[in-house]
Amino acid sequence: MMLNKKTLVVAAILGAVVACSTGEKTEVAQTVGPQGGSEASTSEVKPGIKPEKDRNVAPPFALKDLDGKTVQLADYKGKVVLLNFWATWCAPCKLEIPWFEEFQTRYKDKGFEVLGVSLDEEGWKVVKPYLERTKVNYRMVMGDVMIDKAYGPIEALPTSFLIDREGRVAAVHSSLVDKDETEGEIRELLRISSGARVSDSVTELASAQH
């Protein structure tokens, strides 16, 4: 379709090996932003949230979802968005998806949305059965050459962009994300205090007991 699948397969395998061989995420990855810049990240230097002055406007796009409806970044104006590039053959991608579903459920009412962008060369032929089987709770669209060029090129999967309420790229994660770190970034962009998270957990626990 638009990418060299062999390159992405190698990146996905390396990411899976790293994730499975240690209790923590210890990797060297390269994060590529919309403007083509890159920066090395390791377990000692975490990506984190970029200062507001360093955030670039996220490139606009218009892509089709499973129902054939056009989805644009502008549809999410005023929300914090986790834009995740993935593929059905990517093991680390599928490891992240349940985490993203948790984030979608937990923060949707607070102005947060996850949007998945599939880069499967076979298109909906392979993505549709996967989504029907897993019942992913957030929206998925099919990527194309234009979005790959605008946000990359995407050289490793998974790759995720956190976009703030003003439509700017606030953080970039190439390869498997750190779940807790990413949730912390989401909360920071939503302006939710760490204390509120404890309250959320207590409320969820109380609800589960009734």
Image (cartoon, grey):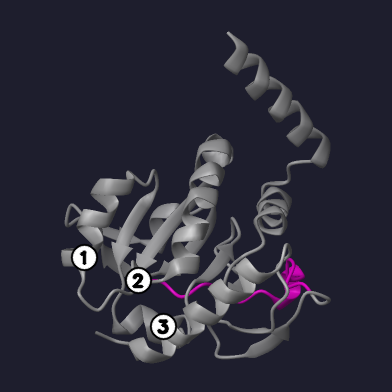
Percent of width and height locating residue 24 = 73, 64
Q: Does any portion of residue 126 appear in the rendered image?
A: yes
Q: Which mark is residue 126?
A: 1
Q: Residues within 10 Å of mark 1 (few under 14, many from 20)?
A: some
- N-terminal label among 1 and 2: 2
Q: Nearer the viewer, residue 65 or 181?
A: 181
Q: Residues within 10 Å of mark 3 (few under 14, many from 20)?
A: some
Percent of width and height locating residue 163 = 57, 63
- Assign the magenta stretch its main secondary structure: loop
Is 53 left or right of 117, judged from the image as shown? right
Find the residue positioned furthest to the top: 210
Image quarter (top left, top right, bottom left or bottom right) of the N terminus: bottom left
Q: Amino acid at mark 1?
A: Val
Q: Nearer the viewer, residue 64 or 137?
A: 137
Q: Amino acid at mark 2?
A: Trp
Q: Amino acid at mark 3?
A: Val
Judge whether 2 appears above or below 88 on screen. below
Image quarter (top left, top right, bottom left or bottom right) of the C terminus: top right
Q: Is residue 49 magenta?
A: yes
Q: Are marks 2 and 3 in contact (CB under 8 Å)?
A: yes
In 3D space, how far apart are the residues under numbered discs 3 and 1 (Cα atoms)?
A: 16 Å
The residue pinned by badge 2 equals 89
Q: Which mark is residue 9?
A: 3
In 3D space, how far apart are the residues under numbered discs 1 and 2 (Cα atoms)?
A: 9 Å
Secondary element at tag 1: helix
Per the rendered image, the range of residues in magenta is: 46-60
Percent of width and height locating residue 10 = 46, 86
